């Protein structure tokens, strides 16, 4: 039993290390774009290309799972369809060469196909979705989507940074930007820590209730 516990701890530590290394790539990519290549933050930069490659890899992985896991196929098709739509949206600068806003058409096609395929496999949507809610890896996916779809959009709006810089008139602008980014990201981290703590406590409280019920 102890060997199994130690093995699980080592696997968790390795997973955490890989997560840290993956997250550290974000500031490294930005530094490469801004200070090494010195081309700002273009659509073809290291940061943007990294985003597209990671999103594409996630999409393909979920599609492979949908192919190999028929009991979860309907739900996984919906998840993969969402990721594929996001990937196509990231490539809007390529679609704009055809026509401005052209990305909406392939995204609409993906959405319709995903809904149609999920409808065919509708018996594997709700049960698989319920199982995913009990899976800690899926919590990472939800956290990532929340950051990409909501936090990054709000935290990166021009009006927010205009307000920050306007309110800091007379202060050192680089220091103010640095502090705003650092403290804002720290707050995001603590939100995730609290979220995980609540889920962890809830999981154990439910287990305790089930254990108590079994003795009644």
Image (tube, rainbow, N blue to C red):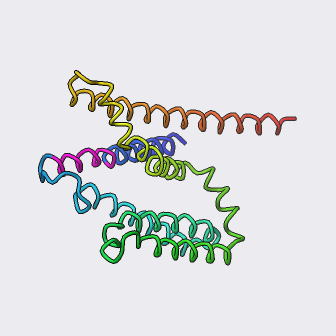
92 within the magenta span: no
Residue 33 percent across, percent down from the top left: 18, 52
User: In screen coordinates, is 174 left or right of 36?
Assistant: right
The residue depicted at 52 percent of the width and 68 percent of the height is 81
Corner quadrant of residue 197: top right
Q: Is residue 113 above or below residue 7?
A: below
The residue depicted at 70 percent of the width and 62 percent of the height is 126
Residue 180 percent across, percent down from the top left: 33, 30
Q: Which is nearer the eye, 206 or 86? A: 86
The residue depicted at 48 percent of the width and 71 percent of the height is 107
Q: Which residue lies furthest to the top in this view?
A: 170
30 within the magenta span: yes
User: In screen coordinates, is 30 left or right of 136?
Assistant: left
The residue depicted at 60 percent of the width and 71 percent of the height is 73
Corner quadrant of residue 189: top left
Q: In this view, does 88 lie above or below 199?
A: below
Residue 82 percent across, percent down from the top left: 51, 64
Instruction: Magenta stretch: give its range.
Output: 22-34
State whether the magenta stretch is mostly helix, strand or loop.
Answer: helix
């Amino acid at each position: 039993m102890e060997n199994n516990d130690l093995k699980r701890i080592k696997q968790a530590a390795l997973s955490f290390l890989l997560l840290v290394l993956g997250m550290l790539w974000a500031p490294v990519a930005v530094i490469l774009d801004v200070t090494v290549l010195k081309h700002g933050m273009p659509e073809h930069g290291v940061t943007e290309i990294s985003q597209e490659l990671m999103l594409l890899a996630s999409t393909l992985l979920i599609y492979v799972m949908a192919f190999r896991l028929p009991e979860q196929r309907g739900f996984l098709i919906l998840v993969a369809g969402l990721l594929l739509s996001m990937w196509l949206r990231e490539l809007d600068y390529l679609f704009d060469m055809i026509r401005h806003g052209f990305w909406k058409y392939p995204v609409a096609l993906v959405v319709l196909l995903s809904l149609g395929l999920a409808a065919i496999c509708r018996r594997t949507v709700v049960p698989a979705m319920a199982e995913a809610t009990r899976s800690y890896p899926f919590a990472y996916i939800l956290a990532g989507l929340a950051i990409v779809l909501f936090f990054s959009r709000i935290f990166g709006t021009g009006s927010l940074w205009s307000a920050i810089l306007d309110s800091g008139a007379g202060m050192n602008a680089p220091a103010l930007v640095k502090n705003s980014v650092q403290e804002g990201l720290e707050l995001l981290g603590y939100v995730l820590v609290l979220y995980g703590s609540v889920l962890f406590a809830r999981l154990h409280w439910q287990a305790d209730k089930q254990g108590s019920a079994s003795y009644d």
